[in-house]
Image (cartoon, rainbow, N blue to C red):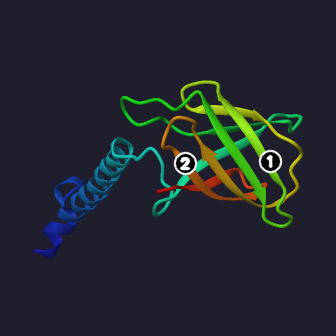
Amino acid sequence: MTDMHENLPWHRQFWPWFIIVLIGSTVIASLATVWIAVVAAPDRVDGAGLFAVPVRFSADREILFFDMGLPPPGESWPQELGVTLVARNDGSTQELQASRIDERNYETPVELLVPGSYKVTLQADGSRLTLQGNWAYPAPVWKLEEDE
């Protein structure tokens, strides 16, 4: 009986097909996982109650750009936002007025910043939108939370 199993071609034996099915099901499961991750991806992954705002500078470091992300459905971000940067080491303050340049991005002129920790406040005139948080400059993101 063992001679009969040994003489069968590979495609007539159990184990090669078992291994092929096992590998095939793994590939299908991984593709399904990637599809679920792409379809159900959140707009942002920030942490409990935090709103991450990516920040970048112009080449001459005189213009600060930040990305508020897409606004909630049916709404839009205000045309202008007040930005307050307070240095935690010496208390120096910069009051800035940021203008919206497209659906999600703002720009504002800024004075030279020294590396350090800053308290950031974003406020919109005529709106209840107020975000406050911290910025460890030169990190490329503000971590803000909505002010109740």
Q: Which residue is mark 2?
A: 130
Residue contact between numbered discs 2 and 1, judged by CB atoms under 8 Å: no
| Residue at 23% across, 65% down | 15
Residue 59 to residue 134: above or below: above
Could you tell me which secondary element the residue under label 1 belongs to?
strand
Residue 94 to residue 60: above or below: below
Residue 28 to residue 70: above or below: below
First in sequence: mark 2 or mark 1? 1
Find residue 50 and report its horizontal and vertical position in percent.
51, 58
- From the image, which quarter does the N terminus lie in? bottom left
Find residue 18 and report its horizontal and vertical position in percent.
22, 62
Rendering quarter of residue 9: bottom left
Could you tell me which secondary element the residue under label 2 belongs to?
strand
Separation of marks 2 and 1 at Cα, in angstroms: 17 Å
| Residue at 48% across, 48% down | 44
Find residue 70 and report its horizontal and vertical position in percent.
48, 35
Q: Check disc 1 and give the amino acid type.
A: Gln
| Residue at 52% across, 35% down | 126
Check disc 2: other Cα within 10 Å, few if <14, some if 14-19, many if 20+: some
Residue 15 to residue 138: above or below: below
Q: Check disc 2 and give the amino acid type.
A: Thr
48 horizontally vs 91: left or right:
left
Q: Residue furthest top?
A: 102
Q: Which residue is mark 1?
A: 94
Instruction: Compare residues 89 and 73 and report the one nearer the observer.
Output: 89
